[in-house]
Amino acid sequence: MSAKHIRQCPCSFLIFITLIFSLLLLNVYAQDAESDNFNNEVDSYVRHIPSRSVKAQSGKVEVIESGVKYTYKLKLFDKLPVELSVNPEYVSINRSVAVELPSHLTGFSTDIETTLPFFNLARTYFRIGLSPSFYGDNWAFSSSNFRIPSRFFCIYQPNEKWTFICGIAVYPRYENSVLPIAGFIYKANDKLVFYIVPHRPNISYALTDRVTLFVEGDSSIAEFVVNRDNSENVILRYAQAHLGSGARFKINKSIETSLSAGEVFNHYLRYRDSGGKAGIKDGLYVEFRIQARI
């Protein structure tokens, strides 16, 4: 990331530096850890989408996405599994287009998720998740950019190799308020895993104990409440999908890094009130990710 990019996305850079410092501390503790039961997880990424032309108009748009998710796992009453998480996100937008767009988008979400037995059905579970969230164009969040997305789905594990999921995700006050959740996980053997689920579906192959190759795709549609010209609290829809490949590197039993690259498509920023749209042409992306568990 160049000095120009750092000036354009100071929050992204701060998130990245804070993560590196945290991981150094985590590594000190992880080296002495004897248990494989990890209750704390940190997942951070920086994704750079270089400048691309915009469809049907002059100008270009460059995007840098970043985020950090911290998750804590516990068991209530020593029985009920619960996951709590916080997730700040930042999108830097460098643009030269006629459509008025913010220079950055911000998000902050919390999440609580639990898994319950599904009646008396064997190997079947019901999972519930709630995500109180704020999405806007600055860190001064208000009730206008507050949402509570939720998800409800069943999990069926007929054996150790197969896991199936099916349900719905609900997004109140979004343009598409209900979306299906469906997918499966297939562990062919100790090396090959098919992780075909809505969030970050991938196929991975463990080349060695420390190096894993993967093909990964994902898509996201988020709605941010922003200010445009003299209008306040207008909704800007940001969407993108990507598909690429890369490698994960296991530093120790607690920390992994990954580097991947590929193609971005269906990439656009659009105001819901017909205030304009910037459809970005397909192009390259590069992503760096760090995951830590203790």
Image (spheres, helix red, strand yellow):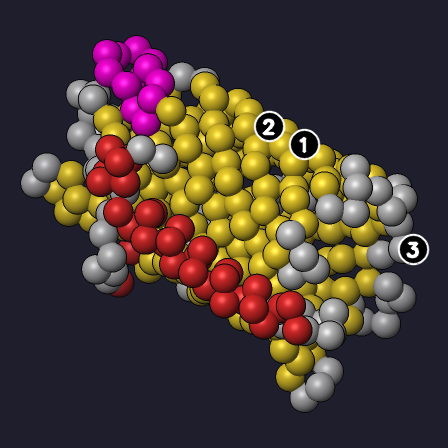
What crowding class fits label 2: few (fewer than 14 Cα within 10 Å), some (14-19), or many (20 or more)? some
Looking at the picture, which amino acid does disc 3 mark? Answer: Asn
| Depicted 273 relative to depicted 106: above or below | above
94 relative to 25 in the view: left or right: left
Identify the residue position indicated by label 1 in the image: 215
Identify the residue position indicated by label 2 in the image: 244
Which corner quadrant of the image does residue 213 belong to? Answer: top right
Q: Residue at x 18, y 30 (%)?
A: 100
102 relative to 148 in the view: left or right: left
Q: Residue at x 41, y 45 (%)?
A: 66
Identify the residue position indicated by label 3 in the image: 159
Observer-nearest of 39 and 230: 39
Please provide the residue range marked out in magenta: 51-62
Q: Residue furthest bottom?
A: 77
Q: Which of pointers 2 and 1 lies earlier in the amino acid sequence? A: 1
Discs 2, 1 touching: Cβ within 8 Å? yes
Q: Residue at x 77, y 71 (%)?
A: 117
Where in the figure is residue 79, as x and y percent of width and height? 73, 82
Looking at the picture, which amino acid does disc 1 mark? Answer: Val
Which corner quadrant of the image does residue 268 belong to? Answer: top left
Where in the figure is residue 56, as x and y percent of width and height? 30, 11
